[in-house]
Each structure stands twice: as structure tokens, then as C-alpha cells.
Image (tube, rainbow, N blue to C red):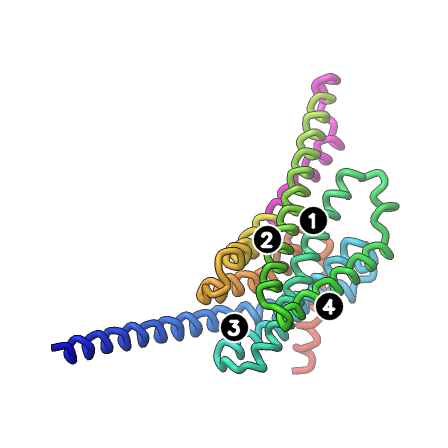
Amino acid sequence: MNNIDLHDNSSGENHSYNEDNSTREAVTIINCILNAPLMLISILGNALVLAAIIRTPSIRSTPHMIMLCSLAVSDLLVGLIAQPIYIAQQLTKDRYVNYVWKIIGPFLCGVSLLTITAITVDRFLALHYHMRYATLVTESRVKYVLIIIWLISLLIPFFYFWKISVQICLISVFIVICLIISTFSYIRIYRIVRRHQLHINAQQQAVESSDAENILNITRLKRTAMNTFVVYIVLIICYFPLYIVSSVSKDWKIGWKFSSTLVFSNSCINPFLYCWRLRELRAAIVKTAKQVFCQQTEVN
């Protein structure tokens, strides 16, 4: 009787173990399938953004475009290097591939997150210090900030070889700091836009006339606030789940898989997001795409 009980329990445990393995394998396959198109879109989208900025001298020298160029480079490398290594690590479970992923992944995604945060702060400064913005945010200062961002992001992955819990803690801290800074910047942007709108409305009522320039200013400010808000929401959706997972448990493998894919998706979304936000960038991308398409047609 005891032998039968032991056999039955063993069979149940093996069945449960097999179910766990099959579930993990299914999750891994689904996750890799999700990453494949995101990787291709990220490569094509960010390569096109970079080509458009490089081929358009009139926009590439501005501080804002320099930051966008840095973001496009990091997002392009995410699709070109980080995601293929991540997919290989998921499928092969190779120890050395895992080491490379632990360095490349946090580094490139960290650059992307910090650069988006810097761009959000830049938009706040452009509104808050609109008269002194050109003197405060110069090309050289932006380049120094970007160099610091790349160096800081490069240091984080190496904590993995010292103590993985420290690396996870640092990732959580960086994510929450960036989200707090972005939240603060958006709230201030909203208040500035709201204050300007009330001020302009009061002026219009005082003179009982509609000033076309004031209406244009309100429209531009509203567009800036809305664009920044969309970037902020996308940032929250893509990075906050990773913060939750890293704060809850480092052993929640399914959570890590899908939260990492969400972070990757941010590199895929950014080119479309900033193309939609910036009219001059959108025009440059359309022009570049037409030139590339025409060249390919002539070659064929």
C-alpha cells in the first residue's frame, strides 16, 4: 500500500514538473516570437531616423536633435545587438551568451531610458526658460550630458559579476528615478501650458478681440504638452512593469521575460513617436525614404 502511494505521489510530482517545463518552454517561444518583429521594426525605424538626421544639415545641429540622434543610436543597437543576443540566450540557455546579455541588455536599455528622460527635461526647460533656453541648453552641454549618460549606463551591467542583487537594485533605482524626473517634468509642463492659456484668455477678454498670434501660441503649447504626455505614458507602460518585477522577485522568470520585451518595445516605438511629434523630422524621414526607394528602383 505504501509503495502504491509513493509511486502515485512520484507520478504526480513528475507530471507537475513536466507541466512546469512545458509552460516555461511555451512562454520562451512566445516571448521570442514577440521579439522578432520588434527587433526588425526597431532596426529599420531607427536606421531611417539616423539617416534622415545625418542627411539634413538644417536639423542635425540643434541640441534636441543631437539627443534624438543619441536615442536613435541606442535604440538601433538594442534591435541590432541586444535583442538577437536575448533571443539566443532564451533559446540556448548558454552560460556565456547569458553573460554577454547581462552586459549588453542593461547597458543599451539604460542609455535609452536615460536619454528619453533627458529629452523630457529638455522640453520642460524649453518652456520654462523659453527666453534663455538657447544659452542654457547648448550643443556642447548636450554632448557632455550624453557622454555621461553612456558612461553611467556602461557601469551598471558590471555589477552583475560582483553581486546580481546589487545590479537588480541599481536597475530598480534608475528606473524609478527616471520615472520620477519624467513625472515632475510633465507636471511642470502641464502647469506652464495651463498658466499661459489662462493668461492669454484673460488678455483676449480684456481687449475683446481674437489675436491670431495668441491662438497660435495656445495651439503650440497644447501640442507640446500632449506630445510630452504621450511620451511619458509610453515610458510608464514600457518600464514600470520591469521596476515592479525587479522589486518583487528576481526569481519570477515569466515576469522578467515579458517585462524585458516591453522595454525592448520602447526602442521600436520611439522612432514612430518622435516622427509624429516633430514635423521637421517627419519631413526629413519622408524625403530620405523616397531617396532610398528611388535609388533602389534605379539599381533594379
Can residue 286 be seen in the rendering of this structure? Answer: no
Please tell me whether the stretch drawn in magenta is mainly helix, strand or loop.
Answer: helix
Q: Nearer the viewer, residue 4 or 73?
A: 4
User: Callout 2, which amino acid?
Assistant: Leu
Give whichever of 98, 261 is nearer the camera: 98
Q: Is residue 3 above or below residue 201?
A: below
Tag 2 residue: 235
Residue range corresponding to the magenta coloring: 204-231
Mark 1 residue type: Thr
Please report whichever mark, 4 or 3, sits nearer to the chain's N-terminal start.
Answer: 3
Q: Secondary structure at mark 3?
A: helix
Mark-to-mark CA distance, 1 and 4: 23 Å
In the picture of the structure, the residue carrying the numbered disc 4 is: 51
Q: Is residue 139 left or right of residue 175?
A: right
- Where does label 1 land, which residue? 120
Q: Report if residue 221 lies within the magenta region.
A: yes
